[in-house]
Amino acid sequence: MLVNPYHIAHKNRDVLKEFAMEAKITNNNLPANQHNTDTSKLDNLYSLIEKLTSTIQEQTSTIQKQTEAFQNQAKKVEEQENRISELLDLLKKADSELSDSKKLVKTLKTLLSSKEVDLDALRRLLFQGGREQKKDKKEAASQMLKKSKNSIT
């Protein structure tokens, strides 16, 4: 989590400026014989303001570095999400191919378990042509099952 120290330091800087201005106004409002000729207090306040200013600048550069690091991490996460998406697509494709292969194996087992194998049906199953539709395949498989049941009995 990024902390914004700039805001806190900036608030402190404003408070110190107010003290310095108040001290200056107070000093100027006094009669000449009561003026505080010791400017060390004001100098201390101004040096504190300078220190706070340098601290703010350092914190600003730190925040910029943290922001860059965060942006780099976000970019890496996005790349990893894209890679995961690609892998999921590949997995779905492989799963679909596996499902198709399982259906083919099941149909082959059905064809081969019968005593008489219809070679035409087997060829159509193994070398599926563009003319044959899924409906025709299912009908051929069901006919093969009927033939195998009839030949068994």
Image (tube, helix red, strand yellow):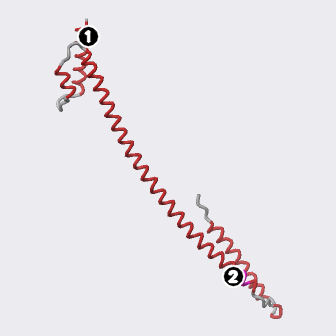
In reply to whether residue 122 is colored magenta, the answer given is no
Q: Is residue 45 magenta?
A: yes
Coordinates of residue 130 in the picture (x, y in percent): 18, 32
The residue that label 1 is drawn on is 149
Q: Does residue 114 appear left or right of residue 50 in this picture?
A: left
Pointers 1 and 2 in contact (C-beta within 8 Å): no
Residue depicted at 67% across the width and 75% down the height: 13
- Residue 51 position by quadrant: bottom right
Q: Quadrant of residue 102?
A: top left
Closest to the observer, 30 or 46:
46
Q: x, y (%) of residue 101?
A: 30, 29
Q: Residue at x 33, y 38 (%)?
A: 93
Residue at the location (36% across, 38% down)?
Answer: 92
Q: Which mark is residue 46?
A: 2
Residue 85's disc number: none
From what the image shows, is residue 76 above or below residue 131? Answer: below
Q: Secondary structure at mark 2?
A: helix
Farthest residue, direction top: 153
The magenta segment is: 42-46
Residue type for callout 2: Tyr
All told, the count of numbered labels is: 2
Q: Counting other residues with Cα less than 10 Å from the Cα at mark 1, is it few (<14), some (14-19), or many (20 or more)?
A: few
Residue 114 lies left or right of residue 85; in this view the side is left
The quadrant of the rendering that contains the C terminus is: top left
Disc 1/disc 2 C-alpha distance (Å): 104 Å
